[in-house]
Image (tube, rainbow, N blue to C red):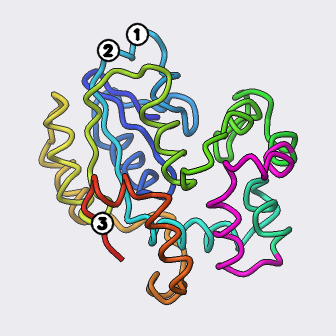
């Protein structure tokens, strides 16, 4: 999470958050990091009243990005280790397991993951997900991205009105989101948004080449609310 006097930026995983964080920390007055992948519900009390924004990404593309990023260092992320069978499973089987992680039949896998996650946030520089949070993932119908979005952006009675941009047009949406939250975009910041290089991108081919029909339909079924709310398609 990043805080300014006017707004919060919620860093939803794999949606351009490092790019946004870097630009705001460099070019926005009094911007500061608050926690690491901190959900909006856990913002300090004095910041909860601030308007907030985040970015969403096409779910089919999001899962490819998540997979290729974690596959380079599979031991780093306990969630990836479990659903990829210690890095041995291919994309289809890994994402199939991830999409079913909230099902009651996967309680043993969730507990395995939970025990490998930090018990609290202190020093948590990975996904930001703690042991307790993972144990609370008990939605049998939700895709992982849907669950993660609810947790990061809408859980815990967070104030209504969070604004969501599209990662696919981040350079256009970011100035608009800042201004809609009461912030201002200086000439310097506008120039940086337009020209700064991409951050933390994983090398990969077009996301559509990773899917067979069964997995494509599974994402559509489990993440239907994101697909419909943000007008995504395969």
Q: In the image, 183: left or right of 56?
A: left
Label 2 environment density (alpha carbons within 10 Å; few <14, some 14–19, many ≥20): some
Residue 54: in magenta span: no
Is the Cβ of the residue at disc 1 closer than 8 Å to that at disc 2? yes
Mark in front: 1 vs 2: 2
Q: Residue at x 58, y 37 (%)?
A: 36
Q: Residue at x 47, y 39 (%)?
A: 150
Provide residue 149's location: percent of width, then percent of height.
Answer: 47, 44
Q: In the image, 145: left or right of 93?
A: left
Provide residue 14's location: percent of width, then percent of height.
Answer: 49, 58
Look at mark 1 in the image and give the residue it sits on: 46
Rendered image quadrant of residue 199: bottom left
Which span is picked out in magenta? Answer: 88-111
Provide residue 228's location: percent of width, then percent of height.
Answer: 29, 57
Q: In the image, 145: left or right of 78?
A: left
Look at mark 3 in the image and give the residue it sits on: 232
Mark in front: 3 vs 2: 3
Provide residue 56's location: percent of width, then percent of height.
Answer: 36, 54
Q: Residue at x 65, y 79 (%)?
A: 92
Rendered image quadrant of residue 8: top left
Identify the mark at residue 74; answer none if there is no mark: none
Using the image as rendered, state which of residue 213 and residue 23 is in the foreground: 213
Look at mark 2 in the image and give the residue it sits on: 49
| Mark 3–mark 2 distance (CA, rounded to whole Å) | 30 Å
């Amino acid at each position: 999470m990043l805080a300014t006097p006017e707004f919060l930026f919620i860093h939803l995983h794999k949606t351009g958050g490092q790019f946004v964080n870097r630009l705001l920390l460099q070019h926005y007055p009094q911007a500061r990091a608050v926690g690491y992948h901190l959900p909006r519900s856990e913002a300090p009390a004095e910041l909860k009243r601030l308007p907030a924004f985040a970015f969403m990404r096409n779910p089919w593309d999001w899962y490819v990005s998540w997979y290729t990023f974690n596959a380079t260092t599979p031991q780093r992320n306990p969630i990836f280790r479990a659903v990829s069978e210690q890095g041995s499973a291919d994309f289809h089987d890994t994402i199939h397991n991830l999409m079913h992680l909230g099902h009651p039949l996967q309680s043993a896998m969730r507990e395995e993951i939970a025990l490998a996650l930090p018990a609290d946030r202190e020093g948590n520089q990975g996904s930001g997900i703690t042991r307790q949070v993972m144990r609370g993932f008990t939605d049998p119908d939700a895709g992982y991205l849907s669950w993660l979005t609810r947790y990061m952006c809408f859980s815990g009675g967070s104030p209504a009105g969070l604004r969501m941009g599209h990662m696919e047009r981040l350079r256009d949406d970011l100035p608009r989101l800042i201004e809609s939250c009461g912030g201002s975009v200086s000439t310097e910041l506008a120039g940086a948004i337009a020209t700064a290089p991409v951050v933390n991108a994983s090398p990969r081919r077009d996301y559509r080449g990773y899917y067979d029909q069964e997995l494509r339909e599974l994402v559509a079924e489990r993440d239907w609310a994101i697909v419909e709310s943000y007008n995504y398609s395969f």
